[in-house]
Image: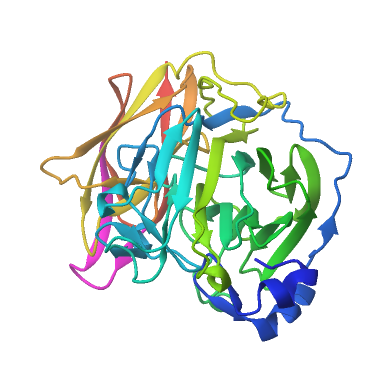
Amino acid sequence: MCPAPSEISKVYAARIEDHGGSSVSNINLLALAVAAIGLTSIEAHAEKIDLTGFKLTFDEEFDGRSISQTGATTTWADIRAANRYDANSDIGFGKSSFLDSASGYDPFAVRNGALTITGIPYTVRSGYPGSWQSGLIHSRQSFVQSYGYFEMRAKFNSVPGTWPAFWLLPATTLHPAGRNGSLWQELDVVEQYGAYTQGVYSTIHTTQAAPSGVSWNFFSSHPEISSGFHTYGMDWEPATIKYYVDGVLMGTKPTPDDMAGPMYVIFDLARDTPYAANAAAMTMDVDYVRAFSKDPNAVAVVQAAVSTPGGSDPGLYGATSAKAPPADVLTLSLYEDAYKGDCEFTVSVDGAVIGGVRTTTGTKAQPQSLSLPANLARGAHKVTVNFLNDIYEGQGKDRNLFMAGLKVDGVARYGFGDMGAGGPHTYAIQIP
């Protein structure tokens, strides 16, 4: 991420921190801004979002609450497994810890069709001492998708130190640390800083060695951004990534070569480090999070009941939603050789991922059954299980995934499948 060039010295005098956990000293801020490709202050262009030909694939209207620590049985998880600090918190970033309600402080509240995240100074013994207590939720276990349009409608505030964000991370890293140093893949749809209310930021973090290998940034000028609800969207496609505010195009960049695999949705309210001493509570209100795909094999979802706090709903921009849930049930019977943790994987039908990242604890003696909604018309189909976290450290020190069988609507369509090696494993099935 990168601040507006005009605000580097006065707003980020100490440092800024990115979602990957690294920090950038003030000395390097201007250099980063100059080096970043496409860092611009952009006024709205005439082009507006048009999703004709897209399907609605994810829809969270926040008419109820579905949040847990792991996300195993809920839409959202509020702790990132790799970033857990203690039993009930995520280490966070900036001057923040992200808490689960079991900590004694609940940062989340659902009311009037919106989710409110509230951040306050340190009060309970969870999270790192002295940090602000706030919230983050992600969809890794329930929803991942390659390419498409992702949008959040939200209301930010202008309290100095607020740092709300809506972003995507890969289900698994395409190029791990080692290609171009310690860089990573991340798509920041929007970040806003309460200390500077004149606009919002969008960033592409990439390991791609050229042309930048660091990050590609947009600054979009919107002096009205801290008043009322606004929509923030990103159309991520194989060739280009486009950013939108209130349905209007803000900027376009070519898609880096490491932005090809499925990613999951995150949003959070962090505390910006230079303003940690400001005791004013901070809030972020989210009306909805929606995702769309133009993959013909993507499974559309039924749109949930729409609520519109703070104004009218913009609709689906020409996209279609399902009239009913998928007609078929795909059931996989899975087990593992566990080693240093359980197997993680995604399941795709004809190239489109169904749901999110799955975990199995099944054994050969007692496989675990996984049932997924699908639309499987007559004819040939390909079911792909992508084994994400394979490990091999010698004989008897490896993690392996196996499929004992595959059924469609209760009828066996495939038998045993050995997925000992990591990566995608595809099984051809025929529906008569």
Q: Quadrant of the C terminus?
A: top left
Q: Which residues are magenta?
A: 389-404
Residue 256 shows in the view: no
Name which residue lies at 53% across and 38% down: 351
Name which residue lies at 44% across and 48% down: 137
Question: In the figure, 330 relative to 68: above or below?
Answer: above
Residue closest to the far front: 279
Which residue is at the front of the view, 126 or 91?
Answer: 126
Residue closest to the far bottom: 27
Name which residue lies at 73% across and 26% down: 52
Asked if residue 403 is among those painted magenta in the image, a careful observer would answer yes
The colouring scheme, among rainbow, by chain, secondary structure or one colour, is: rainbow
Where residue 81 sits: x, y (%)? Answer: 34, 58
Where residue 128 sits: x, y (%)? Answer: 34, 69
Question: In the figure, 172 relative to 208: above or below?
Answer: above
Name which residue lies at 70% across and 67% down: 3
Residue closest to the far right: 46
Where residue 287 sits: x, y (%)? Answer: 56, 34
Does residue 72 appear left or right of residue 49 in this picture?
left
Does residue 201 appear left or right of residue 117 in this picture?
right
Does residue 314 appear left or right of residue 172 in this picture?
right
Asked if residue 78 is among those painted magenta in the image, a careful observer would answer no
Q: Quadrant of the N terminus?
A: bottom right
Q: How many marks?
A: 0
Does residue 158 appear left or right of residue 7 in this picture?
left
Question: In the figure, 168 relative to 93: above or below?
Answer: above
Where residue 365 sits: x, y (%)? Answer: 10, 42
Which residue is at the front of the view, 277 or 319?
Answer: 277
Residue 79 shows in the view: yes
Residue 185 figure quarter: bottom right
